[in-house]
Image (spheres, rainbow, N blue to C red):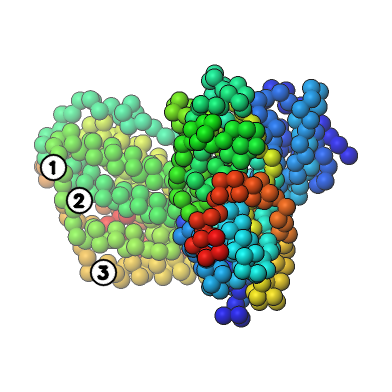
């Protein structure tokens, strides 16, 4: 059996190999393919091509109208794909329960050559990371990205007295270090998730990008006063260290997103309401929107995880208790931040104004507590247990 | 020593260690006790082969002829055990600038020819023999400029051929020699821009490397080695990366019918004499 291909003037240095490979791939081993063509040095190149690709070469006749060569289809071209494995499928329901190390970085749905390198992604089990709505959360996050340059009214009027601006800079200083923790944690786990769970990796990556933007706008707003920022306390950093050091994805996600960022949504809402200027108010509104998505993903994958693993709730409980014990002797929310929140809500230093500000901060803490209890109950904790665990959450809020 | 088959190979590139470490593991996993030793150059390898330092040599075609001549002189038996599919039926080409004065082989008279390393069969010895057979003798009818990269490696390194190709484009030589596969490679990578050069002449087909065995080698181990080599399959994911690195799809039984061109070149240019004298058989 002999097949024919005409390359016309196309040379093997111009893409003729594409046509030859396509034609040869469709032929059974042993079939001869007569190659016609007029490209310079075609016979020389066909000999080298055939040898390199595992096909036999039969020199052609130089006479006009004769093939430049005949290639006899070898077995090697298709042998590379023997034993190749399909890595699930690209749809969201195409994820497998456990993604093998040898699928590596391959796209979900790709056919993976056997014998490739193994990548040891620590988070390779669906139940540890997956959420059915991860893809939708990523798309929502991508659509909600905002440009700090144009989204924030940086030049809006500021009429607040210096002590209010000082209080704001202290709060911003605190927010920056907390958001740094909120960037580092998903960024670290992003590199540990098996790429088979692409949507989870994307959500964590955009979460880190959100936090990078928050660092940018909080810092830029603080620098409207001066390049000297506020205070960073040892207790605050100790609280964040327990978060950054948590090696378990589920536990870190629980502490960061469900409890910490969940509380931060309330804090940012509070700061939006009590912002001393339009620029700050807009920063807080946009940051709160982003944080709400982070909470939504944490809730979604942990709720799924808890349904698949009956031991998860006990582990989550243990994580709160351990963190509480570790932080028992630290100061919690530093007095400077607490006072600054009071001043921002008060707007002035009269006893009456401060009383109102203090009441607003107490109310904020109550709202945070209610929110945590609500989320804990949605994860499956009983009401009394949710109340007890919420009370153990770090006094540093994050 | 005879409970382990030992192979000699020349370290022409760092990947040689990856290749033979990989094959070693593959052979050991299939019950063949195997080890290898690397040499800097083929002359030392052939010398040590006769000194009994190892059993099987992964020889260049020139090293094969060196071994064959020494064996003949000493009354020893020598055979080519196996070779790559890609070692069979190679050709070399002489390339000229498309707009240059050399239109036919005879136009090379008085011109300059860039060749590879002095000991390269494919980029020096065989093309020079090909031209000599057409009446053009190197250093008599045309000047030869050698692009010596890694002498002692018998042209295993592509550098000399690439340098000759660049010198051709730069107008430093009027023609350049290279193996057919490198001509395609240089065309694809742009070293030889399309339309800038053309093939003046192509040698006849010849064979390249082989596994060389001398008489007295441990027969059972050699037989098992041969059997395992020929049993390597490109669809085996354990061995495929090694075959890719070594540049083959399948091992073939050795043959010696493809060394005639090189033998004639060596005779014409007395290319084996220095080594044979060193071995005391010249």
| Residue drawn at the location 57% of the way across and 80% of the way down | B1
Q: Nearer the viewer, mark 1 or mark 2?
A: 1
Disc 3: which residue: A328
Q: Residues within 10 Å of mark 3 (few under 14, many from 20)?
A: some
Question: Is residue A109 at least partly visible in the picture?
Answer: no
Q: Earlier in the sequence, mark 3 or mark 1?
A: 1
Q: Residues within 10 Å of mark 2 (few under 14, many from 20)?
A: many
| Residue drawn at the location 57% of the way across and 35% of the way down | B137
Would you identify the image quadrant in which residue A165 lies?
top left
Q: Chain of mark 1?
A: A
Q: Nearer the viewer, mark 3 or mark 1?
A: 1
Disc 2: which residue: A337
Element type at marker 3? loop
Element type at marker 2? helix
- Residue B256 on image: x %, y %: 70, 56
Disc 1: which residue: A228
- From the viewer's perspective, tell me whether residue A389 is left or right of residue B214: left
Quick check: A292 above or below A13?
A: below
Q: Chain of mark 2?
A: A
- From the viewer's perspective, tell me whether residue B94 is left or right of residue A6: left
Q: Chain of mark 3?
A: A
| Residue drawn at the location 34% of the way across and 42% of the way down | A212
Quick check: B174 above or below A369?
A: above
Nearest the viewer among A26 and A378 is: A26
């Amino acid at each position: 059996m002999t097949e024919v291909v005409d390359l016309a003037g196309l040379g093997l240095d111009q893409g003729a190999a594409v046509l030859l490979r396509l034609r040869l791939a469709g032929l059974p081993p042993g079939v001869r393919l007569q190659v016609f063509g007029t490209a310079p040095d075609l016979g020389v190149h066909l000999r080298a091509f055939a040898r390199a690709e595992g096909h036999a070469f039969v020199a052609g006749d130089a006479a006009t109208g004769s093939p430049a060569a005949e290639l006899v289809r070898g077995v090697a071209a298709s042998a590379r794909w023997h034993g190749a494995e399909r890595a699930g499928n690209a749809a969201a329901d195409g994820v497998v329960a456990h993604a093998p190390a040898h699928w590596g970085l391959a796209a979900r749905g790709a056919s993976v050559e056997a014998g490739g390198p193994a990548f040891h992604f620590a988070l390779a089990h669906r139940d540890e990371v997956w959420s059915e709505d991860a893809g939708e959360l990523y798309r929502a996050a991508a659509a909600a990205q905002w440009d700090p340059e144009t989204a924030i009214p940086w030049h809006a009027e500021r009429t607040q007295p210096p002590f209010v601006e000082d209080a704001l800079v202290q709060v911003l200083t605190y927010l920056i270090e907390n958001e740094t923790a909120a960037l580092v944690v998903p960024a670290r786990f992003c590199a540990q998730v098996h790429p088979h769970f692409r949507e989870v990796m994307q959500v964590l990556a955009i979460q880190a990008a959100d936090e990078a933007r928050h660092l940018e706008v909080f810092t830029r707003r603080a620098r409207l006063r001066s390049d000297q920022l506020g205070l960073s306390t040892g207790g605050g950093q100790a609280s964040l260290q327990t978060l950054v050091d948590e090696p378990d994805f589920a536990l870190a996600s629980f502490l960061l997103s469900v409890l910490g960022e969940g509380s931060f949504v309330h804090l940012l809402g509070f700061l939006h309401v009590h912002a001393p200027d339009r620029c700050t108010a807009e920063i807080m509104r946009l940051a709160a929107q982003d944080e709400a998505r982070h909470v939504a993903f944490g809730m979604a994958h942990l709720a799924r995880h808890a349904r698949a693993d009956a031991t998860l709730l006990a582990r989550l409980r243990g994580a709160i208790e351990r963190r509480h014990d570790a932080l028992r002797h630290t100061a919690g929310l530093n007095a400077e931040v607490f006072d600054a929140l009071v001043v921002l809500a008060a707007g002035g230093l009269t006893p009456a104004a401060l009383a109102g500000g203090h009441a607003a901060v107490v109310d904020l803490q109550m709202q945070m507590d209610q929110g945590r209890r609500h989320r804990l109950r949605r994860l499956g904790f009983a009401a009394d247990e949710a109340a007890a665990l919420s009370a153990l959450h770090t006094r540093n809020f994050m | 020593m005879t409970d382990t088959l030992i192979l000699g190979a020349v370290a022409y590139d760092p990947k040689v260690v990856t290749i033979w470490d990989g094959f070693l593991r593959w052979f050991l996993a299939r019950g063949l006790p195997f080890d290898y030793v690397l040499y800097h150059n083929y002359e030392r390898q052939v010398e040590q082969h006769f000194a009994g330092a190892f059993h099987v040599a992964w020889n260049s075609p020139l090293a094969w002829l060196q071994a064959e001549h020494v064996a003949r002189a000493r009354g020893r038996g020598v055979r080519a055990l196996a070779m790559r599919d890609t070692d069979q039926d190679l050709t070399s080409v002489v390339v000229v600038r498309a707009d240059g004065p050399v239109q036919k082989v005879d136009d090379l008279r008085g011109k300059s020819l860039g060749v590879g390393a002095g000991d390269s069969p494919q980029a020096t010895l065989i093309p020079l023999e090909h031209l000599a057979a057409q009446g053009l003798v190197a250093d008599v009818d045309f000047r030869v400029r050698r692009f010596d990269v890694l002498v002692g490696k018998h042209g295993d390194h592509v550098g000399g051929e690439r340098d000759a190709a660049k010198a051709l484009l730069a107008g430093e030589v009027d023609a350049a020699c290279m193996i057919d596969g490198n001509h395609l490679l240089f065309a694809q990578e742009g070293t030889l821009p399309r339309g800038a050069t053309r093939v003046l002449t192509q040698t006849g087909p010849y064979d390249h490397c082989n596994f060389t065995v001398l008489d007295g080698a441990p027969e059972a181990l050699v037989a098992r080695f041969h059997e395992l080599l020929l049993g390597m399959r490109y669809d085996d994911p354990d061995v495929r990366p090694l075959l890719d690195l070594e540049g083959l799809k399948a091992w073939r039984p050795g043959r010696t019918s493809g060394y005639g061109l090189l033998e004639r070149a060596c005779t014409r240019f007395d290319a084996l004499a220095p080594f044979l004298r060193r071995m005391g058989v010249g």
